[in-house]
Image (tube, grey):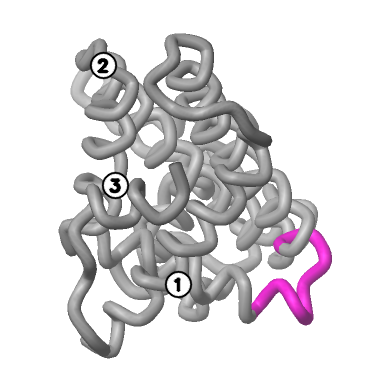
């Protein structure tokens, strides 16, 4: 049997049972996300993934298109999960302003430094990795769209004044990203979320 198999006991003996290609690809993706979250996107290598899985680098290479694609997918999986979590959280609140305030509180409370590091490294490494750069752009578009939907919700209900929801969302996202990037080196204090909303809405 090949290296993609694993041992399972059977009738008192040990029988080699193959894992499917989809199972192996899922294991590789999971390992890559774990490494990126725990150690940083820049530590993601074939050897690191192989060591995490307890297999050879050659086996990992067999199941991925390229390391650039694996890095991009790890980045995308982590930040898309963050967006899903935040959207689910704020959906529990009804008032538009409180929803945005909760979004800001959640993203700026310092509890997501692991994902902040992934974002910062994604921007930097994307300059040399086009697959990653494309995924960064896609995820930023998704975040902007989610924030714009919240702003538009407030505009439609009269809580916020009329304006360009997408442009305002872009400005708010830039402020969130900048403040979180600064927090990595503990530079300056994060303003109150309500103050950020007052600046833009």
Q: Is residue 50 visible?
A: no
Residue where numbered disc 2 is placed:
95
- Pick the quarter of the image with the C terminus: top left
Q: Nearest the camera: 22 or 152?
A: 152
Q: How far apart are marks 1 and 2 (CA)?
A: 26 Å
Magenta-drawn stretch contains 113: no
Residue 131 percent coordinates (x, y): 79, 59
Q: Which residue is drawn at 45% across and 72% down?
A: 178
Closer mark to the observer between disc 1 and disc 2: 2
Vertical side of 37 occupied by 73: above or below = above
Residue sitting at 55 percent across and 22 percent down? 152
Residue 116 at least partly seen: yes
Q: In the image, is 100 to the left or to the right of 120?
A: left
Q: Is residue 81 above or below residue 174?
A: above
Q: Which range of residues does the magenta coloring cover?
A: 125-132
Could you tell which of marks 1 and 2 lies nearer the N-terminus? 2
The answer to whether 78 is drawn above or below residue 117 in the figure is: above
Q: Which residue corresponds to the image point at 37% horizontal and 65% vertical from the top-left?
A: 116
Task: Look at the numbered disc 2 and give the secondary structure of its residue.
Answer: loop
- Lateral position of residue 187 relative to residue 4, left or right: left
Q: Quadrant of residue 36?
A: bottom left
Q: Is residue 48 left or right of residue 182?
A: right
Identify the residue under disc 1. Answer: 178
Residue carrying label 3: 104
Q: Quadrant of residue 92?
A: top left
Q: Please give the name of the residue rendered at 65% of the width and 65% of the height, measured from the top-left corner.
A: 58
């Amino acid at each position: 049997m090949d290296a993609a198999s694993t041992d399972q006991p059977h009738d008192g003996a040990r029988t080699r049972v193959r894992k499917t290609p989809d199972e192996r690809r899922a294991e590789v993706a999971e390992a890559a996300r774990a490494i990126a979250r725990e150690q940083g996107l820049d530590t993601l290598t074939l050897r690191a993934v192989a060591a995490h899985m307890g297999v050879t680098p050659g086996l990992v290479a067999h199941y991925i298109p390229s390391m650039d694609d694996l890095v991009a997918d790890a980045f995308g999986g982590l930040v898309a999960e963050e967006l899903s979590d935040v959207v689910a959280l704020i959906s529990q609140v009804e008032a538009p302003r409180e929803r945005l305030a909760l979004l800001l509180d959640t993203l700026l409370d310092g509890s997501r430094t692991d994902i902040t590091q992934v974002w910062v490294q994604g921007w930097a490494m994307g300059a040399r990795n086009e697959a990653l750069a494309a995924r960064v752009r896609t995820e930023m578009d998704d975040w902007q769209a989610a924030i714009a939907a919240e702003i538009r919700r407030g505009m439609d209900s009269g809580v916020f004044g009329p304006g360009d929801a997408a442009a305002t969302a872009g400005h708010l996202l830039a402020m969130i990203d900048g403040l979180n990037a600064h927090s990595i080196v503990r530079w300056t204090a994060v303003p109150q979320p309500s103050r950020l909303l007052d600046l833009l809405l």
